[in-house]
């Protein structure tokens, strides 16, 4: 029977459907009204919660989600984004099949260190510049989205937003490294091999560029990135006591890390030469869009988390791998991770106990399946937009889904048999 309480999931569903459909069906309207629409869903959530539980509870929930969940998350992402945009890579062996293979491999590793967003924005321009004379470059962009923008982020909380959410909820910093390395390689190695073979064949149709001396600028950002990685890891080892900021309860280590993230971002923006950011075509607009998306998600997701916590999903790791994966592909990986993490009990210390099959399955699904569609992870749409502006004839939503499925679905099936059966 219909209950007014069922309306509490409408704002979250509205957020996801808005981000999934409007950019494709009404791009100009969405670009102009994205913030208004997103905050409208947040306001509706506040209203519904107030009607169900009272105004005080509604405002307390909004405050807690914004301060304890959203703010630490977006501060870390912004710092990684600023640092990545302040490092310039010029020259190198890219443009030849072996060089392109090396760039994709390096990008996959960097994604774990500086995040999929940072690594993607750092390396997409060198890849496109080095292959500018090639008529067919879509295979390189497809591999780039799969590896650099998604799969490579599986090894640390810095790599991909879902794992960062898990880290902020108590999953140890190096848990993904020890538990997802082999599953990541099962996807990475075949994709690299297929891309190299395709690139080797297609490269015969166009003159190859001469290798240039590799030059890297932005040393201050490199040093700060290393310090920042250490700070994030340290914050996870000993979160310490929590502080109450009105209705929000946040660990002191997370407060310190959030403040440090702001300092790192400010120093990076202040001290990085404009020439570096200009060559990287750095802009805050993609980060603004991501911030709006995740603010709307974090502030409307609580009713869904409560419902999922009571859902009878069973304990079959294969089911969790595919369900979390398919939700990630079409609904974005971060809210999917949150939903399934809560459905698994929401207790990190319990979930990491060996063999930790449920946490491994939902983590792998949330990260790996993000490469299946343009909606799966924030960098996917960013890379598509950059490549399109640079003259690459990128496939539409259906075309990309088909191409990615041909490559990835057999590998996901292999993952299921080997790790989750």
Image (cartoon, helix red, strand yellow):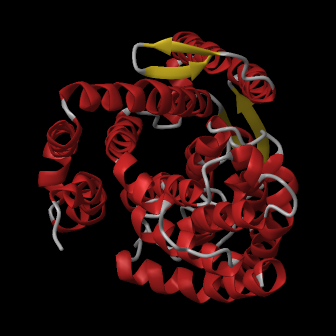
Look at the picture and state if 350 lies above or below 360: above
Residue in the picture at 14% in, 62% down? 26
Q: Position of residue 47 (x, y in %)?
A: 14, 39
User: Which residue is located at x 31 percent, y 58 percent?
Assistant: 16
- Residue 394: quadrant of the picture: bottom left
Report the residue at 18% width, 28% height from top.
Answer: 55
Residue lying furthest front in this view? 1
- Of residue 179 and residue 272, the one placed in the foreground of this image is 179
Identify which residue, 82 or 157, lies in the foreground: 157
Height in image: 278 above or below 328? above
Q: Quadrant of the N terminus?
A: bottom left
Residue 236 as seen in the image, left or right of residue 27:
right
Q: Where is residue 85 in the image (x, y as percent from the top left)?
A: 56, 32
Relative depth, front residue between 51 and 216:
51
Residue 264 against residue 130 in the figure, above or below: above
Residue drawn at 58 percent across, 43 percent down: 165
Q: Which of 253 and 246 is in front in this view?
A: 246
Q: Which quadrant would the C terminus be assigned to in this image?
A: bottom right
Left/right of residue 277 with respect to residue 126 in the rendered view: left
Residue 156 visible somewhere in the drawing: no
């Amino acid at each position: 029977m219909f209950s007014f309480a069922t309306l509490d999931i409408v704002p979250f569903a509205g957020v996801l459907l808005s981000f999934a459909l409007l950019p494709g069906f009404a791009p100009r309207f969405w670009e102009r009204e994205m913030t208004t629409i997103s905050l409208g869903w947040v306001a509706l959530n506040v209203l519904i919660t107030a009607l169900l539980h009272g105004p005080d509870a509604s405002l307390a929930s909004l405050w807690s989600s914004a301060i304890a969940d959203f703010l630490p998350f977006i501060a870390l992402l912004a710092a990684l984004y600023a640092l990545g945009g302040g490092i310039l890579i010029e020259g190198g062996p890219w443009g030849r099949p072996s060089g392109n293979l090396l760039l994709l491999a390096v990008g996959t590793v960097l994604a774990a260190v500086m995040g999929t967003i940072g690594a993607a924005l750092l390396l997409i321009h060198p890849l496109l510049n080095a292959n500018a004379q090639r008529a067919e470059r879509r295979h390189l962009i497809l591999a780039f989205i799969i590896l650099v923008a998604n799969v490579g982020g599986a090894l640390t909380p810095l790599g991909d937003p879902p794992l960062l959410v898990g880290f902020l909820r108590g999953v140890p910093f190096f848990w993904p490294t020890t538990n997802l390395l082999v599953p990541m390689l099962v996807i990475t190695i075949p994709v690299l091999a297929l891309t190299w073979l395709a690139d080797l064949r297609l490269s015969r149709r166009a003159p190859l560029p001469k290798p240039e001396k590799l030059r890297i600028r932005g040393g201050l950002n490199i040093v700060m990135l290393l310090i920042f990685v250490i700070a994030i890891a340290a914050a996870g080892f000993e979160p310490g006591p929590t502080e109450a900021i009105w209705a929000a309860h946040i660990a002191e280590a997370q407060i310190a890390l959030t403040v440090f993230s702001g300092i790192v971002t400010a120093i990076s923006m202040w001290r990085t030469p404009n020439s570096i950011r200009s060559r990287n075509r750095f802009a805050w607009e993609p980060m603004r869009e991501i911030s709006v998306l995740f603010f709307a998600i974090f502030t409307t997701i609580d009713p869904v988390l409560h419902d999922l916590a009571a859902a009878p999903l069973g304990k079959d790791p294969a089911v969790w791998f595919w369900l979390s994966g398919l939700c990630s592909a079409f609904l974005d990986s971060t809210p999917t991770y949150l939903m399934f993490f809560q459905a698994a009990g929401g207790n990190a210390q319990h979930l990491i106990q060996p063999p930790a099959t449920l946490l491994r399955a939902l983590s792998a699904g949330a990260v790996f399946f993000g490469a299946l569609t343009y909606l799966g992870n924030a960098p996917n749409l960013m890379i598509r937009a950059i490549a399109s502006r640079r003259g690459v004839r990128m496939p539409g939503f259906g075309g990309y889904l088909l191409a990615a499925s041909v490559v990835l679905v057999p590998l996901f099936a292999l993952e299921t048999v080997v790790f989750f059966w």
